[in-house]
Amino acid sequence: MRRPIRVLIAKPGLDGHDRGLKVLARALHDAGMEVIYTGLFQTPETIARSAVDEDVDVVGPSILSGAHNQLVPEVVRALRSAGKEDALVLAGGIIPEEDIPFLKVQGVAKVFGPGTPLSEIIRFIETHFGEPVRGA
Amino acid sequence: MSQDLGNLLEGVRNRDRFSLARALSLLERYPDVAHLLPRERGGHATVVAVAGQPGAGKSTLLGRVAAEMTMRDMSVAVLAFDPVSPRSGGALLGDRIRMLDAAEHPNVYVRSIAARDPAGSSVLPALLAVLDLYGFDFVFLEAVGAGQEASPLLLAADLALLVLVPGLGDSVQTLKVDVLQIADLIVINKSDRPGAAELVRDLSTYYRLLADTSHPVPPILQTVGSEGQGITAMLEAITELRDRYAASGILEERRRRAATRLWQHTLRTRCLRIIDELLNDGPAPDDGDHEVGTRERQLYRKLAERFALLAASSDDSR
């Protein structure tokens, strides 16, 4: 039996806007995933710690503050040093097109900008794990 | 898979969090490997179930208590159960957010669990065995609510803690809470709100007049979780209960009963699954009593066959 995909969505750094992320959380829930949200103002280390403890499959930092080139690579590094390099990292938020190649080199599988349909994010995750996953 | 679990358990014994997290996932995903675990809880962890209506402040209180416990060199695990969407099977696991300060401490482990199989009850003992192996002093099970859904957790635990809040209706509402009868400790959280004194009075009256006299009357504490008020008293009440129940043999008795109930629960689940499978097999009867009667007899015959098969296979495995 396959367990549902577990997703940690996170707000690293000084960025107090999580309304979009909460909508995403609900959408992933409705798609049968287990979603963990740890709240605002997290450090990359706390995020990595939560990812390990909760044994998640996906880590999704959302950044609307413009600090993505700094914070997202730090999240990836923190995950690696915590031994959690197998997690799929997806970034979201206000991220300019020209920054995406850099983030991908840093280990982000995909960047979802403003206006991305929720279904596209769901489909990307499901495809990555091989099948649409239903809850047991 | 059993080898994986073996390696992971070795890691758990060496207090490796990564192995701990993986071992719990493995058991959640493949409950059948649970039989590879030691049947009894070998360690010294005290398991405390925490029930209370959504929004009562269970997570916040647990975060505070866990933080206070680390200051006394105790290690703490929290299994935070959240409801599963019956429609999608998904879950929003939001308890961790209230425990972040504690969760950063190396002696605290917080794990969010989607309460699939009623409150995860059939894998629960396996999860507890792993946490025990890691060597936690306390394991808190945060239930989804205070009703039916909380009972598997309460029955698996050494101590049952009930969190209530003032202002959620009149005293009749309070009396409706199932868990009152089995609570070992009652915490009135958000006690800075109006109605706290009345709630204490109602509960005291209930226990004086109505409660089962064979069960010790639980202490009633008042807290304000968000301010950290009453946390020390809560911690001390928990450790005191543990010591008292351990000394009087109540803990041992409860663990024995929990093991029996688990065994019954596992069998019941297995039987019900077979019944459901057979009931859903074939179209619903729709033309009159005669047809219904025939279908019913067919069902009993098929059930007998299936149970006979089960009886034979469990003979073989012995």
Image (tube, rainbow, N blue to C red):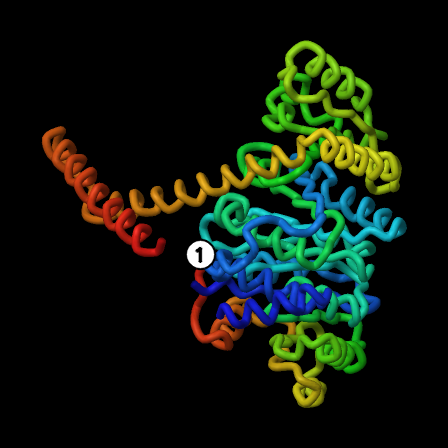
Q: At which x and y percent is residue A64? A: 75, 70
The chain carrying label 1 is A
Task: Tell me: B47 left or right of B298.
Answer: right
Tell me the residue that label 1 is attached to: A136
Instruction: Determine the residue located farthest toward the top in the rendered image.
Output: B209
Image coords of residue B19 (percent x, y): 65, 68
Picture quadrant where residue B271 is located: top left
Name of the residue lying farthest toward the left: B290
The amino acid type of the residue labelled 1 equals: Ala
Q: Can the viewer see residue A32?
A: no
Q: Is residue A40 above or below residue B120?
A: below
Badge 1 marks a residue whose secondary structure is loop
Q: Is residue B65 above or below residue A117?
A: above
Image quadrant assignment for residue B162: top right
Residue drawn at (79%, 70%), measured in percent from left and top? A45
At x 64% / y 12%, what residue is drawn? Answer: B210
Q: Give coordinates of residue B87: x percent, y percent.
A: 45, 50
Looking at this view, is A117 or B283 the one in front? B283
Q: Residue at x 50, y 38 (%)?
A: B260
From the viewer's perspective, tell me whether residue A132 is left or right of residue A36.
Answer: left
| Residue B160 x, y percent position in the rendering | 67, 34
- Residue appearing at x 67%, y 84% in the figure: A107
Instruction: Give the class, few, some or many, for how many residues have Cα within 10 Å of label 1's Cα (few <14, many ≥20).
Output: some
Along the line of sight, the residue nearer the viewer: B69 or A39: B69
